């Protein structure tokens, strides 16, 4: 009977940020769709009420089903049977529950049977699911690959694939290969045009593919024979119903065990080109990666939340030397630092999500009509902020999440090292967050330009100038001092 | 295949599973104000069985029927959010104080008036009274067959429903012609969660009374979208003999309510020694728990 949304007041706080009204108005094009869709909102308040009610369902499913299943999924794991993935039983139950509740395709347009939610409430759902089971969120959260289809595919492709995602089919993004990890320019999987069959054919191997046996996959492949760099790569949609891809094996991982990490063999698998040829890496993958990084940021926050809660509960219950251990300074200091890191990660998450919402929504509007000058300027402003904050947030939150998991185990003492408590799993699950979708070191590379050229500084100075209540004035002073230090540190 | 017309009988009950200190009043009656009102759990199992029929047979409709005070409309919305098509709230002061006999009379009269049903599904019993009588009494009053303790509605073929029953010592599979009443056990699958789109579609659904008291910005909606008007029926909408309703129609009288507190001193420690086990076995055989 737990509810992972209503038991966490911070979520509602972020959901009702003042910028949300603008985001929702833009996203809903002034609430036009209420004429055609019986579930479209009437106005901003109505939309907020819907987010709240839907997130309550997410919280309920996560509290009652996903979280209780996490332990057995971790023990059982997925398997490969006849070259295809069989999920753990609990994973199937989770997918069934979320599908029945209509929680797939949350951010897709209504005409493709999506909920047309902005990124913020969608990411909030990801935050909640991650707290329940960090491995499962990878399967559920891959629905945001559909965003890339929505952004770059033809109308025909959108109509063909997006309603299937809304109906609950799972996705995968097939990028990595044995010799192309962080360096995706080295991708070799071959795409060749078959005149007779009038389709592209994919041949080769992909490795470390999360949910690699998903129903619909985006595949990065070399469409230009003889090329060696990123300019010879294009993006393709592979539809599992067509056949041609087999799962050779599933990796045996340290954590997120419920999420099958597959080695895939493509043998004359038909692929549909999505977006522009030769721009697979440059455009599509960058969009995919930015979405995925925000997803991992959310996953890191969810894991941090569960680590913090487990540590807090244990510290209150565990009695040593005649009192609960939370009453010892060494322990409560750890707990308060954990909470500070958790809040910082979450604040950065929703701040980034709002930036992404603003610019993506303008971008979609610009497909329908030319933007006014101030709209264009605003889009550029938020795009720039999203570009800075996405790697920065992912890098910071994933490192914090590892630190929180470490501290949560530490607070449990010897018990935390045993499989008897969830922190043992949380500790293993946390480890991947600072590695995949770009290591922390690569996030630094991606964020550094914004940091050194003043974009980030301007934004903090902007926070400094915000109106706040008098009781919080002391925080403004802290912020100014820290920002001055920061400015000194990055000065040439 | 045109689908089936299903009525789900549901009750709003105080959540007796999470009982706090103030759950009982000094006089021994239930303090309803202190307990959150919820959808009776086994009625949710019943609704899930109905929804599974709807998933399988296109064109099936589900109507949630509940009797209770005005706020019981919440139960109907909960049903709509999960996939029911409409609902009837049966509410009237004249129903107050009804025992199972008077309740089943009111429900049966409502169903006679409403007509148009193939299957009536209810939870086995409600967690506030635990009588398990209303479902069977409704079937008797309507003169149709009943299947109790259902765990799974396995199939519907040629006008007959096949149901797996969960009994104390095993399972039984029975077949029965429609129309019929089925009461569902808590051992049946849990009800699915509320559906995001249905929540957004039906969240403004209200009864007439609720509309009158609400300061609603969307008043025009109720004309444009008829499905947002939840049917609210009173004694005037059904044919009833007033003497059979409420307290008048309820032969059940509460003599006394005891507040039972289970204490650990009633516990008995039994070790794994042969002597203790033999003693326990003979006690259990003696009081017919086993054997």
Image (tube, rainbow, N blue to C red):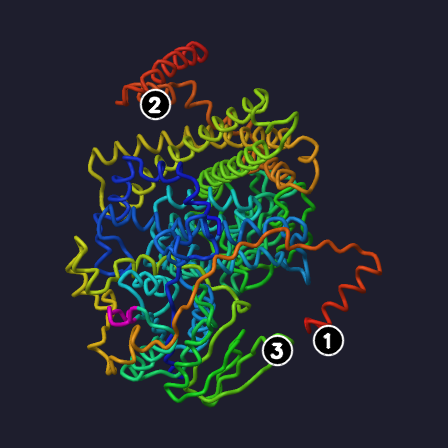
- Distance (Cα) linking label 2 and label 1: 78 Å
Q: Residue at x 32, y 22 (%)?
A: A463
Q: Which residues are magenta?
A: B88-96
From this view, report whether residue A64 is shown above or below residue B175: above
Q: Which residue is mark 3?
A: B171
In the visual, does B279 lie left or right of A287?
Answer: right
Q: Is residue A449 magenta?
A: no
Q: Nearer the viewer, residue B150 or A389?
A: B150
- For disc 3, the chain is B
Q: Which residue is mark 2?
A: A459
* Residue A123, position as x, y percentages in the image: 42, 43
- Distance (Cα) linking label 3 and label 2: 67 Å
For the residue labelled by badge 2, is the local secondary structure a helix, a strand or a loop?
A: helix
In the visual, does A242 lie left or right of B56?
Answer: right
Q: Is residue B91 magenta?
A: yes
Q: Nearer the viewer, mark 3 or mark 2?
A: 3
Q: Which residue is mark 1?
A: B291
Q: Earlier in the sequence, mark 3 or mark 1?
A: 3
* Quadrant hosting residue A214: bottom right
Q: Nearer the viewer, residue A15 or A188?
A: A15
- For disc 2, the chain is A
- Distance (Cα) linking label 3 and label 1: 20 Å
């Amino acid at each position: 009977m737990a509810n992972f949304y209503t038991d966490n007041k911070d979520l509602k706080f972020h959901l009702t940020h003042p910028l949300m009204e603008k985001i929702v108005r833009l996203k809903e094009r002034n609430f036009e769709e209420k004429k055609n869709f019986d579930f479209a909102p009437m106005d901003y308040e109505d939309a907020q009420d819907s987010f709240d009610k839907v997130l309550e369902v997410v919280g309920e499913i996560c509290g009652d089903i996903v979280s209780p299943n996490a332990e057995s999924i971790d023990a059982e794991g997925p398997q490969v049977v006849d070259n295809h993935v069989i999920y753990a039983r609990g994973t199937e139950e989770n997918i069934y529950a979320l599908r029945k509740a209509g929680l797939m395709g949350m951010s897709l347009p209504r005409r493709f049977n999506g909920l047309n939610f902005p990124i913020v409430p969608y990411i909030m759902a990801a935050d909640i699911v991650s707290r329940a089971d960090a491995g499962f969120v990878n399967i559920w959260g891959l629905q945001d690959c559909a965003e890339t289809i929505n952004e770059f595919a033809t109308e025909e492709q959108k109509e063909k694939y997006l309603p299937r995602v809304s109906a609950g089919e799972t996705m995968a993004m097939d990028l990595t290969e044995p010799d192309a990890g962080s360096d995706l320019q080295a991708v070799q999987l071959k795409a060749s045009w078959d005149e007779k069959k009038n389709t592209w054919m994919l041949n080769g191997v992909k490795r470390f593919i999360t949910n690699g046996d998903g129903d619909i996959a985006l595949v990065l492949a070399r469409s230009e024979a003889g090329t060696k760099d990123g300019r010879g790569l294009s993006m393709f949609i592979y539809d599992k119903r067509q056949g041609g891809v087999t799962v050779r094996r599933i990796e045996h991982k340290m954590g997120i065990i419920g999420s099958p990490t597959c080695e895939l063999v493509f043998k004359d698998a038909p692929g549909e080109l999505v977006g522009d040829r030769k721009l697979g890496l440059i455009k599509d993958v960058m969009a995919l990666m930015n979405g995925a990084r925000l997803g991992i940021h959310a996953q890191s926050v969810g894991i941090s939340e569960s680590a913090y809660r487990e540590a807090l509960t244990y510290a209150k219950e565990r009695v040593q030397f005649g009192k609960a251990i939370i009453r010892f300074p060494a322990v409560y200091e750890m707990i308060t630092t954990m909470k500070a890191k958790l809040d910082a990660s979450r604040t950065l998450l929703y701040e980034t999500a709002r930036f992404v919402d603003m610019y993506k929504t303008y971008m979609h509007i610009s497909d329908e009509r030319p933007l006014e000058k101030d709209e264009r300027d605003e889009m550029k402003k938020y795009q720039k902020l999203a570009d800075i904050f996405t790697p920065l947030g992912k890098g910071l939150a994933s490192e914090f999440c590892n630190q929180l998991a470490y501290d949560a185990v530490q607070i449990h003492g010897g018990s935390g090292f045993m499989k008897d408590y969830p922190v043992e799993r949380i500790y293993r699950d946390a480890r991947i967050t600072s590695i995949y979708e770009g290591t922390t070191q690569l996030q630094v590379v991606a964020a550094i330009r914004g940091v050194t050229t003043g974009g980030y500084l301007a934004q903090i100075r902007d926070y400094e100038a915000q109106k706040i209540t008098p009781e919080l004035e002391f925080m403004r002073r802290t912020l100014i001092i820290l920002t001055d230090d920061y400015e000194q540190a990055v000065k040439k | 295949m045109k689908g089936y017309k299903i009525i789900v009988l549901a009750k709003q009950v105080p959540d007796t599973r999470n009982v706090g200190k103030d759950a009982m009043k000094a006089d021994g009656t239930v303090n309803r104000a202190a307990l959150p009102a919820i959808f009776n759990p086994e009625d949710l199992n019943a609704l899930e069985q109905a929804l599974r029929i709807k998933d399988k047979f296109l064109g099936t409709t589900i109507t949630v029927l509940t009797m209770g005070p005005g706020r019981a409309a919440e139960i109907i919305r909960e049903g709509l959010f999960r996939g029911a098509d409409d609902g009837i709230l049966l509410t009237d002061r004249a129903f107050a104080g009804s025992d199972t006999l008077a309740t089943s009379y009111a429900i049966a009269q409502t169903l006679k008036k409403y007509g148009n049903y193939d299957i009536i599904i209810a939870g086995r019993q409600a967690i506030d009274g635990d009588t398990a009588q209303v479902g069977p009494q409704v079937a008797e009053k309507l003169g149709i067959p009943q299947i109790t303790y259902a765990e799974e509605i396995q199939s519907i073929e040629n006008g007959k429903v096949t149901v797996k029953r969960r009994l104390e010592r095993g399972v039984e599979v029975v077949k029965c012609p429609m129309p019929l009443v089925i009461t569902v056990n808590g051992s049946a699958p849990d009800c699915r969660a509320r559906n995001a789109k249905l929540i957004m579609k039906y969240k403004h659904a209200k009864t007439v009374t609720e509309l009158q008291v609400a300061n609603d910005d969307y008043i025009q909606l109720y004309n444009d979208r008829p499905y947002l008007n939840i049917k609210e029926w009173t004694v005037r909408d059904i044919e009833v003999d007033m003497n059979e309703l409420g307290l008048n129609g309820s032969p059940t009288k509460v003599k006394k309510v005891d507040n039972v507190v289970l204490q650990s001193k009633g516990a008995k420690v039994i070790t794994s020694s042969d002597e203790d086990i033999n003693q326990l076995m003979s006690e259990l055989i003696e009081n017919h728990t086993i054997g």
